[in-house]
Image (cartoon, coloured by chain):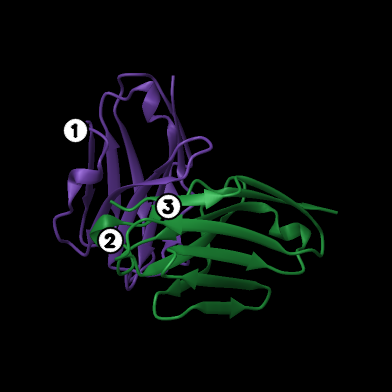
Amino acid sequence: GAGVSQSPSNKVTEKGKDVELRCDPISGHTALYWYRQSLGQGLEFLIYFQGNSAPDKSGLPSDRFSAERTGGSVSTLTIQRTQQEDSAVYLCASSLTGYGYTFGSGTRLTVV
Amino acid sequence: GENVEQHPSTLSVQEGDSAVIKCTYSDSASNYFPWYKQELGKGPQLIIDIRSNVGEKKDQRIAVTLNKTAKHFSLHITETQPEDSAVYFCAASKNGGGADGLTFGKGTHLIIQP
């Protein structure tokens, strides 16, 4: 596609529910990144995928967070048993070389 | 790990004047420094980046300078226009990010006064 596509754009969920956030990177981009942006804060790096290789999960905030990337393309970020502190904008980015990321518009997650 | 400090948090300038945003980083191994512009409701957009083998880079009204010795880099916007109003983020990384990602500053809200 022309850009990085994220869905849904907004998600309101009840505390304790599981959510799945989806990212469609730019076609051909092998590098894919997830970041979290909390209100008024900078961007916090969560996880990186290079092609189909197993990611380093050490940046994920807790074991309630998991991510996968299928076929070297689409990625999903799953948050289990959501908590209010998980409320944030979750941003996905992709890159061909690792430099010059292109970000999607993000998913705004609100846990009530 | 890397730590990036960004100043000021808010900057208000008159239209047509220049704006300067400054960042410092802690890890001397960092060698890639991008700047992103984020408008309300949108994802950050890369506007310019610099690698550690150069000291300055320009693109029309935007320039970035890097001082490796002092470990700081700055964004300069000249002849500011209303559409420059946004939040700007600096970032630092080793080799484009990769497994460690980019480390971002907390952002500068730039306001262009008409």
Task: Please tell me whether mark 1 sits on a helix, a strand or a loop.
Answer: loop
Labels 1 and 3 touching (C-beta < 8 A): no
Q: Is residue A104 visible?
A: yes
Tag 1: amino acid? Asp
Dividing the image into 4 quarters, which one contains the C terminus of chain B? Answer: bottom right
Tag 1 subunit: A
The residue positioned 33% from the left and 65% from the top of the image is B30
The residue beneath circle 3 is: B4
Give the residue at the far left of this rendering: A54
- Disc 2 versus disc 3: nearer the observer: 3
Q: Is residue A50 above or below residue A79?
A: below
The residue positioned 35% from the left and 70% from the top of the image is B31
> Which mark is on residue A73?
2
> Which mark is on residue A63?
1
In the rendered picture, chain B carries what hue? green
Crowd class of label 1 (few under 14; some 14 to 19; many from 20; radius 10 Å): few
Numbered marks: total = 3
Tag 2 subunit: A
Considering depth in this image, is A31 or A62 the residue closer to the camera? A62
Crowd class of label 2 (few under 14; some 14 to 19; many from 20; radius 10 Å): many
Tag 2: amino acid? Ser
